[in-house]
Image: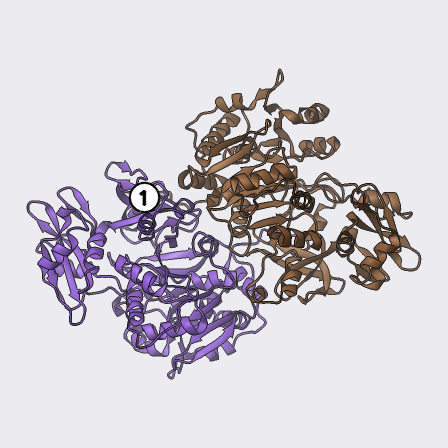
Chain colours: A purple, B brown
Amino acid sequence: MRAVHQSLDIAAILRRAEQFSPRREVVSRERDRSLQRTTYGELGGRARRLASALLRLGLEPGARVATLCVTHRQHWEVYYAAPIAGLVTHPINPRLHTDDIAFIADDAGDEVLVVDEAFLPIYEQIRDRTPFRHVVVVGAAPDGLLGYEDLLASGDPTWQPGELDEWSTALVTYTSGTTGRPKGVAVPHRAIALHALSSALPGWLAMRDDDVVMPVVPMFHALAWGWPYTAALLGAKQVLPGSFLDPASLLELIEGERVTLTGGVPTVWMGLLSALDDETRKFDVTSLRAALSGGATAPPAMIEGLRNRHGIPLVHTWGMTELIMGAIATLTWDLQDAPEDEQRQHRYAQGVPMPFLEIRARGDEGLAPWDGTSLGELEIRGPWVAREYLGQPAGGAEQWTADGWFRTGDVVAISERGYIRIADRAKDVVKSGGEWISTPALESALMDHPAVAEAAVVGVADEKWTERPLAVVAFRPGATATPQELREFITPKVARWWVPERIEIVEAIPKTAVGKFNKRVLRDQFDQDTSKAEA
Amino acid sequence: MRAVHQSLDIAAILRRAEQFSPRREVVSRERDRSLQRTTYGELGGRARRLASALLRLGLEPGARVATLCVTHRQHWEVYYAAPIAGLVTHPINPRLHTDDIAFIADDAGDEVLVVDEAFLPIYEQIRDRTPFRHVVVVGAAPDGLLGYEDLLASGDPTWQPGELDEWSTALVTYTSGTTGRPKGVAVPHRAIALHALSSALPGWLAMRDDDVVMPVVPMFHALAWGWPYTAALLGAKQVLPGSFLDPASLLELIEGERVTLTGGVPTVWMGLLSALDDETRKFDVTSLRAALSGGATAPPAMIEGLRNRHGIPLVHTWGMTELIMGAIATLTWDLQDAPEDEQRQHRYAQGVPMPFLEIRARGDEGLAPWDGTSLGELEIRGPWVAREYLGQPAGGAEQWTADGWFRTGDVVAISERGYIRIADRAKDVVKSGGEWISTPALESALMDHPAVAEAAVVGVADEKWTERPLAVVAFRPGATATPQELREFITPKVARWWVPERIEIVEAIPKTAVGKFNKRVLRDQFDQDTSKAEA
């Protein structure tokens, strides 16, 4: 007799979906905009067959299978096929600079690349700098490359995964590199299983089998890449929007598939709000019970607009490459009868971390009390928080404390109830006259002005105060305002000494590959003293 | 730097409760019926102090701390104190025969006993046969024994747990021994953590911080003993009913504390239904969102009576010592618009197993298909299913298959959706003319008769059919019926050849220590051929 506890692995998640939800749908938007309908039963069989085909390529355990794909069913299949074969899926953000893509493919040692036909030009630019032994094309494969369906057909349809070690690596993901070279995180099977269980709990995603889940952020994003697993484990229907992420296409899917749960960055919801406000075309969005927003702080005016004008509950969430999703801003028991204003303040926060995640905020004088106002750098630990970076690049170890907590780089206040409120990124922090100024709070206040489309705040050197905030603003089409008007608009909303003396007007604010404001570029452009800009 | 993933342990659960829910209440009924109100903050501090006091007794890692207690806050404290100190809590059922109590205390090697003052007579009967080095009394301690509060006061209030191995044993529990000597199961920290996460998911307990949770089954029972951990992890309020389990006392607590979730065996709900039907005293039970029923099959008439007359959703659940809770009969997505009758049939089943539990039914000719009718013995595996019995007593290993699945002893059909429906206990099965007869189905049909209070069915030897069912029936006070009337009543409800030729009338049906019908006693009493009775 060999009786072992079953391990927490992705093969178990796939078995769950195949056995308990074989007829539950997965809907995938194709390149021609048509909707492809499949089921967990079909996808499971294809993922297992693809796994055996990958092994027949001669890959050794732990070999990396990179992807350059949008959110579609083939991408979903690779998320399962590699890990259940003992290989590792490495989703790459196609919007990164090709130098960065080449760097991380090399750093990870990617042996296989699965690439959308549309992204072949990226492959052409990096092929000489990358270790790929096999390139698999979703779509029409040029001579010399493998077709995805051909590869899959070469697999054994009866193949079943063997025993997996839950500590072995299932996925590799890279940080977006806003603060230096991208750093790789090896995510073990176990971390994905635990994240799925904890994030689906009623106080967080509250995901169950009658949900219809649509990720809008791409599948390499920390807000999204756990969902293929979480939704399959729970038996929820999945909607994969492909490359059509414009508001109308998304609204069509929400209406047509009765989406209940979706997640994206604030700019996505901003676009959706505009499309809904523009009543030339009506959409039924009553199925939505939560639109999760992560990656940046959502402006209150947008949250209230979605909620009050269209009945869409925008829910803040917080996550990082190093821990996947970490917190969701639902209301705790003692806030459910609280005044609307107190509820709103908590909905604007990043939320309470999921069970088994532990947090603390480290200020200049030790750990900050949980009083909702004392600031410190957020440190976190838990059973699925990364312990180290791949190959631990220079400076990587500094992101962990001596006792093993991950230093997030977010400056936060923690409330008595455990709500995290991000005041700033430690790297972006503005410290003026010895006091921290919250740049997201200033940005939110500015973006509440009807003429402002985008606003970013950075710190610039100042002789008297060491540093002062500088705001960069882009207007909506046809709208405008003077810096003085903007200052007057925000003065009632923030501390008086926070109000920036300098407000610069630009056409558009430069963004990083994951859609965040690129503050490094702004500092380079506007700050005389560039000592804070990173190498 | 030593950066390790945090382990899945009970110390992490207690930290969660102390940090995120310090003011959430735990209400405990005292011996004088008064309600003691405390909080996770207070209980956490006391549990840590008790842990340090236990260590100061000189106990080595892994030492067993037995309990003979009802469901109260001190018992709750021991559930945490021993495991976070690297010791093991061993809850014992005080209703077992003293020979069995002495056997399992000796088998487990219990070094400490925490005993309610009310159960001291049990201790007196077993003391000479047990290895206890320290006896701690909740209540007034006789000379020579330790007082619980005195022991606790000797601990260090600032003590914090060290690192724990998630695979180390946190609890030991014993099977109820209906089929032989009780067998011990060592439950690792990790199993409790995973059970908490999976059972709290929206499709199962759906537990969150605004719940008010009251276990009615005692804390050693598989339906109850996970709750102190699950509720604390989620921050739900807990109500501990002490020794007052009569319907009026329970209804008072449900009404007064606004209980949302409770769990007990069917006889508890039968008593509650009678008390609610008897309208001399009204109770407000509108807060209840689910009354879980496990340990035996609940009769449909009772389920419908609670639902239709009092708005209480009785929800079937299934569990075992070897896996804690395993399934809950909520409705899956594709049943939510199903006809009432189809919904009812699924509510009467034992439910769908929680994520990461895997099931199969083994019939005479291999694995049975999931068609809702094919019968087989239920086999189960998963990350928190036991792998072996403590010290693996003779015959223990037979309960696991060669490939490591636990053989539950339940004969079940599994539906296409994965619902388990228990047809019978393998040990209790009646096989007549080569076909299985479901004794719970016969019992349910008989208990639906208005005159019948209890009905149990056992198999008796038969020359022609090898075996035939024999029914034993107890009537409600003042009610009666003839065997022929009962046969006519059930004939439309079951297969004609199932109808028992022999129906015996008794005053009351003998029960086991956990309140189940004791079929061994019935067979001894009524069957001429006692070959099926166990040694």
Q: Farthest residue toward the top? A: B143
Where residue B7 sits: x, y (%)? Answer: 46, 44
**Residue occupying the point 38% across, 69% down:** A67
- Do we see residue B130 in this rendering? yes
A107 or B197: which is nearer to us? B197
- Can residue B219 be seen by looking at this rendering? no
Q: For numbered disc 1, what is the local secondary structure?
A: strand
Residue A315's x, y, as percent? Answer: 36, 57
Q: Position of residue A351 (x, y in %)?
A: 36, 50
In this picture, residue A273 sits left or right of residue B418: left
Asked if residue B22 lies left or right of residue A508, the reply is right
Protein chain holding label 1? A
- Outermost residue on the front side: it is B280
Quarter of the rendering occupied by the N terminus of chain B: top left
What residue did someone put label 1 on? A414
Q: Position of residue B524 (x, y in %)?
A: 86, 43
Please determine whether, in this image, residue A438 is positioned above or below residue A472.
Answer: above
- Quadrant holding the C terminus of chain B: top right
Q: Residues within 10 Å of mark 1 (few under 14, many from 20)?
A: many
Q: Amino acid at mark 1?
A: Ile
**Location of residue A526 (image quadrant):** bottom left
